[in-house]
Image (spheres, rainbow, N blue to C red):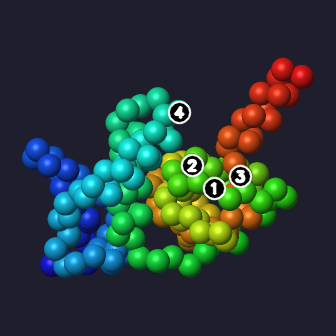
């Protein structure tokens, strides 16, 4: 079995989902075909609910399934916060929350798939993005960042709405 195999989730009823994550980035048994558990299903529906603002149902499903794959199987990551601008307002994100990260005045949209008091693991919902040098964050790529870099899209959207009303 080569190192380039991808994680496959068995969704039942002859449905198999192939994630973009390579075996070398995963913590799981040598057998990469994994059954969807009851916990995975709960996490999937939590992510799907949080992704309601994405208009394409296929993109919502793909993002939710990739979120489950990262939350359940991805190797622990070290924070890579230096790519992103620190934020004045500290935000403790919730599981599945859509957040933004500021890279050179451009915002990337991500979904939080694992949280802790100091850092969060997220998957990118933006297109492929060059972070610095040769470091690229692909669509659905996983990255861990300190929570002081996270921009709450809910808070930002509320502020924008208040500016329009006021």
| Residue carrying label 4 | 53
Q: Is residue 159 above or below residue 101?
A: above
Report if residue 110 is visible in the image.
no
Q: Secondary structure at mark 2?
A: loop
Q: Nearer the viewer, mark 2 or mark 4?
A: 2
Q: What's the distance in space between the residues labelled 2 and 4, CA to CA?
A: 11 Å
Report if residue 74 is visible in the image.
yes
Horizontal and vertical percent for residue 6? Answer: 26, 65
Q: Give the side of residue 35 with respect to residue 118, left or right.
A: left
Nearest to N terminus: mark 3 or mark 4: 4
Nearest to N terminus: mark 1 or mark 4: 4
User: Is label 1 in contact with label 4 (beta carbons under 8 Å)?
Assistant: no
Which residue sits at x=68%, y=40%?
154
Which residue sits at x=20%, y=50%?
11
User: Is label 2 in contact with label 1 (beta carbons under 8 Å)?
Assistant: yes
User: Is label 3 in contact with label 4 (beta carbons under 8 Å)?
Assistant: no
Which residue sits at x=25%, y=58%?
37
Q: What's the distance in space between the residues labelled 3 and 4, CA to CA?
A: 17 Å
Q: Secondary structure at mark 1?
A: loop
| Residue carrying label 1 | 93
């Amino acid at each position: 079995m080569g190192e380039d195999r991808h994680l496959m989730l068995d969704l039942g009823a002859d449905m198999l989902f192939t994630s973009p994550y390579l075996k070398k980035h995963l913590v799981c048994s040598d057998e990469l075909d994994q059954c969807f558990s009851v916990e995975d299903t709960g996490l999937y529906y939590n992510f799907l609910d949080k992704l309601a603002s994405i208009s394409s149902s296929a993109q919502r499903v793909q993002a939710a399934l990739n979120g489950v794959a990262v939350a359940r199987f991805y190797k622990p990551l070290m924070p890579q916060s230096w790519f992103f601008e620190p934020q004045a307002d500290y935000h403790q994100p919730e599981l599945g929350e859509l957040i933004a990260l500021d890279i050179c005045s451009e915002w990337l949209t991500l979904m939080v798939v694992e949280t802790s008091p100091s850092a969060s693991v997220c998957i990118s919902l933006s297109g492929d993005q060059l972070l610095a040098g040769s470091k690229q964050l692909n669509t659905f790529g996983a990255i861990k960042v300190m929570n002081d870099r996270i921009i709450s899209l809910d808070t930002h959207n509320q502020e924008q709405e208040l500016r329009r009303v006021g």
